[in-house]
Amino acid sequence: MSIGAKLMVARASALFEEYCSESSVHGVRFFVGKQRSVCVKLTWLTVFGLSLIGCGIMIQQAYNKWDRTPVIVTLSEVPTPVWDMTFPAVTICPEIKVSNTVFNFTDQFETLHREWYWAQQNSNNTITVDDDSIGKMKAIIHHCSGIYMNDKNFIFNFNHILEPNLVDFLKKVSLDRRNVFTMCGSTSDTRCTNYMQVALTNEGICYSFNMIAQEEMFHADVLHKEYKYLERWDEDGKGMPASDGTNDELLKVAGSGLDAVIGFNIIHYPLKIDTSCVRGRGYKVLIHEPTVYPDLSKRNIRLSVSQTLTVALKPNIMMTSPELTKYSAQKRQCYFDHEHPLRFFRLYNQDNCELECLTNYTLQRCGCVHFSMPHTNETRVCLLEEAHCPTEARGHLFIRKQRRNDTNDYLQRCDCLPACSSVRFDLQITQDSHSEEREVRTTIETQEDLLAKLQL
């Protein structure tokens, strides 16, 4: 080693020894010192090195966590007034789908079954039920329970008979909405029928309160023109809106508690309904955002006949800072409105995205779609003999979520993340039976009885 190199080593050694002697870092001073043995110096060097390695590992873990989830959810320090919020949408679906005063499905179905059976036994027997009635029965069976979809059902021998215009006919035979909803009251607006619409869902004809109109829900240039999914409460059924009495704005919340109550009185007419293929006699209720198209197969509340259903809502508002747009959607695990445009829906949310995903998957699997699914003019609605396929497609797509790592998972490719700004509702549900209330009232003394006792 040259003299110059030796001098540099000596200077570096002296500088290192001076740093270790004067440093405030704990343990460094034990690296040097003539009074300390080599064993002590190596021990402290090892401890110091392990400390650095441990700190490096923790820093790496903290960075990986930030890289995966850079978004932190915190509670807002500024409260939001409840009256600045839009009241949630409420969709109510009768489980009874057919009014027997419009079309007596039970009588026609039993007559057709009887005549078909005797025609199989004797070729001289003929079927007197006309093709128009058979087509109407096939249309109604779209609403019936799964047992009617059994491939051994005799009705599939009439596949050559065309069904009527499916949606128009189902609306025609459905219960009269004005007789079903005898009262609709709100502390915010007593004319709450102004906010009602007839909605076409996977449960058939339903009634939605405080939901945006079809023009705001769908892209009109993409959606087919055969029928409407959302109609005003007072439309005449031919696509002509009422001349007045409608309200394009959504209902705002009036306050908290019973001061902001919305009430519906639903009447059940047992003599006017056809119960052959129904699965119940109550109603299914879904509470959702006004921009979400209702899908009652995913979640709903069931309201039985002769019951009062009381639902208390607690909104959970999720807001995302615009500054997070610089991060990818996969990192923040949500989409802003402009980041994930949908083909049929104007506004993005997770439910609409999954419904569109289900529609595309059903079309790919079945070659047709359910009549409640949004589709183009070129897409065909499934006939009765194909009606089982959309149900199977829904189960195949949504029920098997545990296989989300599968490369062939269609739902994963749809990439339906939550919206960055959304409202979810926590529900507190109370159900009261009317029959129990009457029984209780019979045990309560009247005011006259109490007064008579007090005067004794």
Image: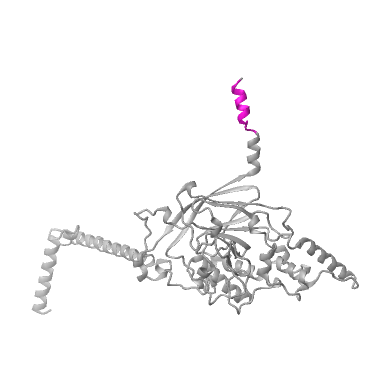
- Give the image location of residue 143, x and y in percent: 68, 64
Q: Observer-nearest residue: 114 or 413?
A: 114
Res. 219 in view: yes
Please tell me in which quadrant of the rendered image residue 48 appears.
bottom left
State yes or no: residue 410 in magenta: no
Location of the C terminus by quadrant is top right
Residue depicted at 65% across the width and 47% down the height: 306
Q: Is residue 260 left or right of residue 176?
A: left
Please tell me in which quadrant of the rendered image residue 389 appears.
bottom right
Q: How is the image coloured?
A: one colour
Q: Main secondary structure of the magenta part?
A: helix
Q: Is residue 388 above or below residue 278?
A: below
State yes or no: residue 447 in magenta: yes
Location of the N terminus by quadrant is bottom left
Q: Observer-nearest residue: 243 or 392?
A: 243
- Name the residue at the front extreme: 243
- Give the image location of residue 218, x and y in percent: 52, 71
Please tell me in which quadrant of the rendered image residue 138 appears.
bottom right
- Give the image location of residue 308, x and y in percent: 60, 47
The magenta region covers 443-455
- Give the image location of residue 376, x and y in percent: 58, 77
Q: Is residue 313 above or below residue 170?
A: above
Res. 404 in view: no
Q: Is residue 219 left or right of residue 203?
A: left
Q: Observer-nearest residue: 250 or 125?
A: 250
The total number of labels drawn is: 0
